[in-house]
Image: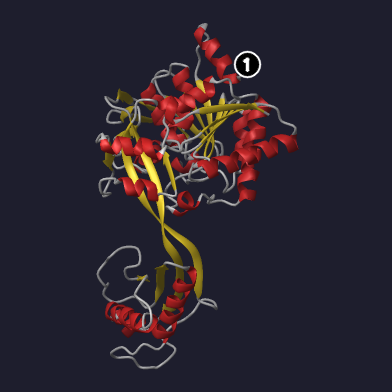
Amino acid sequence: MSAALRLAEAFARGARRPLRILGASGQLGYGVPSPALEAGLERKPDMIGCDMGSIDIGPTYLGSGTMATTRAGAKRDLRKVLRAARSLDIPLVIGSAGSAGAAPHLGETLEIVREIAREDGLSFKLASIAADIPREAVKQAIRARKVLPMDTMPALREEEVDAASHLVAQMGLEALRRGLESGADVVVAGRACDTAIFAALPAILGFPLGLATHMAKIVECASICCVPGGRDSILATLDDEGFELESMNPVRAATPHSVAAHGLYEQADPFEIREPGGRVDLGQVRYEAIDARRTRVSGARFEPATAIRVKLEGARLVGQRSVLLCATTDPRFIERHETIFAGLKELVGSLACEEAPEDYSLFFRLYGVNGGHDWKMPAPAPREAFILAECIAPTAERAEEVVRTTKQCLLHYGFEGRLSTAGNLAFPFTPPEVAIGPAFRFNVFHLMEADDMERLFPVTVEAL
């Protein structure tokens, strides 16, 4: 019998006690500090959880089906947490496998887990949960007016559903709960809500969902909620009235202020958490210092949803990308950059499109002035600025042609007040043009009503 089912039996018999959950890593593949992980294991946790993905990294990994981390980095971290969980015979739950959680990401992650099991002589039951959504199911939901846009996205059209390279939905704790209840020792899920990773076991054991979800939202990022923030494992101790947080690195402190501030992380509203199954109200939450390094949190309340909605994510190919990287210290260039870039676009178009249509998009960003946001020119103007020119075209060759033409034209562009015919740009390396590869954009970022989670997120169990 798996550890999760043993815990459920013990709790059913009345052996109720606080639950210890170890958040091992905020994102597997970028390193799990060993001293903190080992310190966490010494505290005898009941479960280890790890997030492995996000859409913070942009649409390319979902669109391309590739991992954001290296395979070697992912395998190193997976080996650490697998060995840790099996050494204590406790559940290991991993969400958003392989960065974006689509079929290729989940498949690659599962293959790494199998490799580790073979190489290290580990035996356990492995549950996997796919997050890929059938396109026809989404189209039917569109026709039934059961799909809503998020943020500034337009209404979802069926052609965009077909155009997405991969189409996933974020599973909630219900799917992860089924994974644990299947008798698996290790659960690896495709795209999943971060909270589901850590709230599923408490839900099985009957802990209040508001407290469990709030705890999960914090520990999924490991010790980021501490001062100073870091990647070290964090231990949460959950009871029926609240939970305690402690970083497993003694130099990091989970203070009431730092933990409360984490409510701003990835949240439009710091006073609520929205999940497929409902909403967590954080309006009455209390953060109390236990000592200089630990904080106790209480007061979160769960409100069930009247309609279950899952977030759909999809990315489509928009072309091939090449970029130009250079810098300038010419104050006249910096002052007139908007006019220069407009003229340069026109000049490049006249040269690159003499025998072909304008089949590309060319963008400029001037970091130091308005590279990250559309600010007005500061006064005085910065002494130096970094120029990023980006071209997206139908083919890699076309993107490279446009960017190389852009470089040469920019290098000698004649603008008002120019003092020199050359030397107006500085290149960090040569060649300064870089072929990035396929370019994607999110074209599906919507909510879909769903009533059959078992069909949407099937659980598969295998013995290793």
Residue at position x 31%, y 88% in the image = 415
Q: Position of residue 10 (x, y in %)?
A: 55, 10
| Mark 1 neighbour class, 10 Å CA radius: few under 14, some 14 to 19, many 20 or more | few
Residue 148 seen anywhere in this rendered image of the structure: yes
Where residue 298 appears, as percent x and y from the top left, is 37, 25
| Residue at (36% x, 87% y) in the render | 413
Q: How many marks?
A: 1
Provide residue 92's location: percent of width, then percent of height. Answer: 58, 30
Where does the image place residue 249, in percent across and percent down from the top left? 56, 40
Residue nearest the observer in this picture, 214 or 254: 214
Callout 1 secondary element: loop
Vertical placement of 103 versus 353: above or below? Answer: above
Residue sitting at the far bottom: 420
Q: Is residue 251 visible?
A: no
Looking at this rendering, what residue extends furthest in the top direction? 13
Left or right? Give the position of 158 relative to 1. Answer: left
Kindly identify the residue that appears in the image at 41 percent across and 86 percent down: 424
- Where's the N terminus, which quadrant? top right
Please state which amino acid type lies under the numbered disc 1.
Met
Q: Report which quarter residue 86 is drawn in.
A: top right
Using the image as rendered, state which of residue 94 and residue 363 is in the foreground.
363
Determine which residue is flagged by label 1: 1
* 212 lies above or below 386: above
